[in-house]
């Protein structure tokens, strides 16, 4: 399977013509019903699993990775087997055939302590190794989670740094030869301890595998003393993301009440600006959950950050499966919203020479997809 960035083939979805990124957003926003037959037909030869913590990826047009956002709720999208091939339908009508990434032996491995690799980390998109829930989120445990949260009640089983190193070494050097490492955990009430932990992990990776082999991004709770961030860069991290999620202050307070109360919006901003000023452009990143606020305020936030050399990472809201009252009040953004996000974000990446980390992109985020096509999208 070749991985090249092609143009924009169009798919017919209802009365509309979607390109690959439109279709990715539509599936992430609405979810997709998956026929059981898909698993029996493809799980033996492709990276596809029924395991609830697995991170299944579909490939659109052979290049755009999109999470197999499985839901049992009502959605117009369905993944079916048709003539022996996996096919997306919309209200029963053919949209496109998809592919799955090739099979990996990664999920068959266990660490020396007997922990299945897949209990600690997942292979995301084409080639990203992601430790997604290293520890529980204090904010979610406080009863004031972010309104769009999928992971606040999840954490990896107890493990050691050497368990992580075994996984990283296998994924980077053996199978599937991942090219970027992402580490995420729940927000903590003790960001200083969080930094200590990450410094220990970074040093161990560098000692055992070499950080130069695997560029690393950490999603971090910003500390009160910004100078503590220096320790992570001294230890070799490439990028740090402090996710504001929502630029509009009132909506941030409403939808992210725990972040607003315990960490504060200002501290996220201070950390991003500190990193950009001290370590330069493209070292600080910030996820925005696209679809939660008016597109004008989202672009305003992206523009402010981009002007300071901070990389905005728009990631579509995935509302299905979350029963929070706030999201019940939020209707899914339409495709025009995301077309504006794509175009304006591409312009910002071009104008401010920003680089989104990664290779072929995450299956739940749009940012690298936009970056790879920024010339076409900006025009
Ligand atoms: S910070 Fe918010 S989104 Fe992240 S795990 Fe905690 S509650 Fe969930």
Image (cartoon, rainbow, N blue to C red):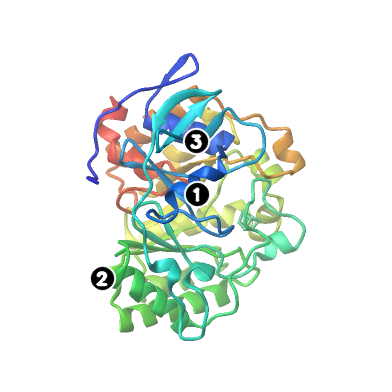
Q: Could you say which quadrant of the image residue 35 lies in?
A: top right
Q: Sort mark 1 into few (<14), some (14-19) or many (20+) by Cα contacts within 10 Å.
A: some
Q: Sort mark 2 into few (<14), some (14-19) or many (20+) by Cα contacts within 10 Å.
A: few
Q: Which residue is mark 2?
A: 212
Furthest toward the front, the residue is 83
Total numbered circles: 3
Residue 175's place in the image compared with 13, above or below, is below
Q: Is residue 311 left or right of residue 301?
A: left
Q: Residue 66, image x and y in percent? A: 44, 43
Asked whether residue 69 is in view, the answer is no
Q: Residue 231, image x and y in percent? A: 42, 75
Mark pair 2, 1: CA separation: 37 Å
Name the mark nearer the viewer: 2 or 3: 3
Q: Which residue is mark 1?
A: 39
Residue drawn at x 56%, y 23% as measured from the top left: 91
Mark pair 1, 3: CA separation: 10 Å
Tell me which numbered mark, 2 or 3, is placed earlier along the sequence: 3
Q: Secondary structure at mark 2?
A: helix
Tell me which numbered mark, 2 or 1, is placed earlier along the sequence: 1
Nearest the viewer among 304 and 317 is 317
CB within 8 Å, label 2 to label 1: no
Ligand 1 contact, mark 1 (Cβ < 8 Å): no
CB within 8 Å, label 2 to label 3: no
Residue drawn at x 54%, y 33% as measured from the top left: 78
Q: Residue 124, image x and y in percent? A: 42, 55
Q: Which residue is mark 3?
A: 80
Q: Residue 323, image x and y in percent? A: 74, 43
Ligand 1 quadrant assignment: bottom right
Q: Secondary structure at mark 3?
A: strand
Residue drawn at x 34%, y 49% as measured from the top left: 356
Nearest the viewer among 275 and 291 is 291
């Amino acid at each position: 399977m070749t991985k090249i960035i092609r143009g924009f083939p169009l798919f017919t979805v209802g009365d509309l013509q979607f390109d690959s990124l439109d279709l990715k957003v539509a599936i992430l926003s609405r979810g997709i019903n998956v026929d059981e037959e898909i698993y029996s037909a493809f799980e033996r030869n492709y990276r596809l699993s029924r395991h609830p913590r697995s991170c299944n990826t579909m490939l659109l047009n052979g290049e755009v990775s999109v999470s197999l956002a499985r839901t049992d709720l009502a959605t117009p999208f369905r993944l079916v087997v048709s003539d022996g091939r996996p096919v997306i339908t919309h209200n029963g009508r053919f949209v496109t055939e998809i592919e799955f990434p090739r099979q990996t032996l990664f999920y068959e491995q266990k660490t020396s302590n007997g922990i299945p690799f897949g209990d600690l980390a997942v292979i995301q998109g084409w080639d990203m190794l992601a430790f997604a829930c290293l520890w529980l989120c204090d904010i979610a445990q406080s009863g004031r989670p972010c309104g769009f949260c999928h992971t606040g009640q999840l954490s990896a089983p107890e493990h050691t740094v050497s368990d992580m190193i075994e996984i990283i070494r296998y994924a980077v050097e053996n199978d599937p030869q991942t090219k970027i490492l992402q580490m995420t955990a729940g927000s903590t009430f003790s960001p200083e301890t969080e930094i200590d932990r990450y410094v220990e992990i970074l040093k161990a990776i560098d000692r055992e595998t070499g950080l130069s082999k695997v560029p690393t991004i950490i999603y971090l709770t910003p500390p009160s003393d910004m100078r503590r961030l220096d320790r992570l860069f001294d230890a070799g991290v490439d990028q740090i993301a402090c996710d504001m999620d929502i630029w509009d202050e009132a909506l941030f307070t409403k939808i992210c009440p725990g972040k607003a109360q315990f960490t504060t919006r200002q501290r996220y901003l201070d950390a991003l600006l500190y990193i950009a000023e001290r370590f330069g452009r493209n070292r600080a990143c910030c996820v925005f959950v696209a679809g939660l606020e008016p597109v004008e305020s989202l672009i305003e936030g992206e523009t402010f950050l981009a002007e300071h050399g901070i990389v905005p990472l728009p990631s579509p809201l995935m509302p299905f499966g979350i029963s929070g009252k706030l999201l019940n009040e939020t209707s899914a953004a339409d495709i025009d919203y995301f077309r504006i996000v794509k175009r304006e974000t591409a312009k910002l990446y071009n104008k401010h020479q920003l680089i989104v980390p990664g290779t072929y992109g995450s299956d739940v985020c749009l940012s690298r997809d936009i970056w790879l096509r920024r010339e076409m999208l900006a025009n």
